[in-house]
Image (spheres, helix red, strand yellow):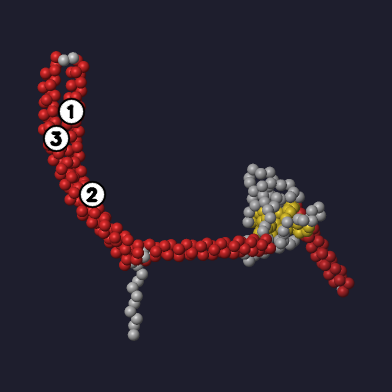
Amino acid sequence: MKSTEAKVGALVVFSAILLCATVYFLGGAQFGRTRTPYRAYFKYAGGLDPGTDVLFGGITVGKVTAVRPDANDPTRIEVALEVKQGTPVNAKSIAKLGSVSLMSSPVLSITTGTNDAPRLQPGAVIPTVETVSLDDMQREVAAIAHSAQTLILAVHSDLDNITADTRQVLANVNDLTGPANRQHVAQILANSDVMIARTSPQIDQIAKNLETVTAKMGPTVDNVNSTVTNANGTISVLRDQTQTDLIELQKTLVEVRSLTENLRAVVRTNQQNIAYTLENIRMATDNINDFTESIKERPWSLVRIKQPQDRQVPKQ
């Protein structure tokens, strides 16, 4: 009885072992038929280990099978990987190190490439792009910090120069608005006002005299024109040359009369403009006086935009 049970138990155990072995070999064969191997080479493969996920366009399609130095070129790392059969890895696909998120483990990411690019054969090398390592980033940050320090020193030097120039401008403004210059400007304005007030009546008188002269020249020109006309009739028997000269003289006198009329019109027109000019000079004098008083009272207005607030009375 015990011998029969032992035989049955041995048969069961043998059957189970045979079943597991069959499943294992069938699974291994099936796995080998559904995976396509590829290779990729990097200068820096930090974080990659056998079993690392391989992503194609962000989708997990395989695993890294080996990470080792290249036997032909020890300056690069050979990464062996396998992806699902039918994954469209093409000649335009690029392999690079990456991660799904900041806190996740590294992955090997393969881009989708282009649709018209030829598909890579099993065992082919996928083109790669290097990822910046932490050491390289630290060196870049250090170089940027050094450049920033140099820039800060240059800006500080420029600020010192600007401050010195500003102080020089303020000193020049103080000299310009000093008591001597203010007194000199006030004296010039006073002399200009006196000169305008003194010459204004004379200019008015000259304008009136010109108008009177032009008014008197009108009858004189008319008389000359009449005389020329009579003389033209008197000497009509003379030679043609003399008659031509008299005609030219008559034309000249007509032009003189026209010129006289124009001069009279100009004098009449400019009489009002002269008055406006004198009035503008008086207004300009008043504005200069106001500007001088403003500089005397608020010399800081030349360099400041806003008026400083009044000082508060201290509370007791």
Q: Is residue 122 left or right of residue 211?
A: right
Picture quadrant where residue 146 is located: bottom right
Nearer the N terminus, badge 3 or badge 1?
A: 3
Q: Is residue 288 visible?
A: no
Q: For the point 72% across and 59% down, which residue is it?
A: 45
Circle 3 crowding by C-alpha within 10 Å: few under 14, some 14–19, many from 20? some
Indicate the amino acid at tag 1.
Leu
Residue on which the image places disc 2: 277
Q: For the point 86% across and 71% down, which residue is it?
A: 6
Q: Secondary structure at mark 3?
A: helix
Q: For the point 80% across and 65% down, which residue is it?
A: 16
Q: What is the distance, in whole Å, between disc 3 and disc 2 at their CAs? A: 28 Å
Seen from the viewer's position, the closer of residues 301 and 170 is: 170
Circle 2 crowding by C-alpha within 10 Å: few under 14, some 14–19, many from 20? few
Residue 94 in the image, given as x and y percentages of width and height: 67, 51
- Quadrant where the C terminus lies? bottom left
Picture quadrant where residue 52 is located: bottom right
Q: What is the distance, in whole Å, between disc 2 and disc 1 at their CAs? A: 34 Å
Indicate the amino acid at tag 3.
Met
Number of the label disc, if any, that sits on residue 253: 1
Number of the label disc, if any, that sits on residue 217: 3
Q: Is residue 202 visible?
A: yes
Residue 221 in the image, given as x and y percentages of width and height: 14, 31
Q: Is residue 98 left or right of residue 206?
A: right
Nearer the N terminus, badge 2 or badge 1?
A: 1
Judged from this view, the residue extending furthest toward the right is 3
- Quadrant where the N terminus lies? bottom right
Indicate the amino acid at tag 2.
Thr
Q: How many marks?
A: 3
Seen from the viewer's position, the closer of residues 156 and 222 is: 222
- Vertical order, 309 against 280 (above or below): below
Q: For the point 68% across and 44% down, which residue is it?
A: 118
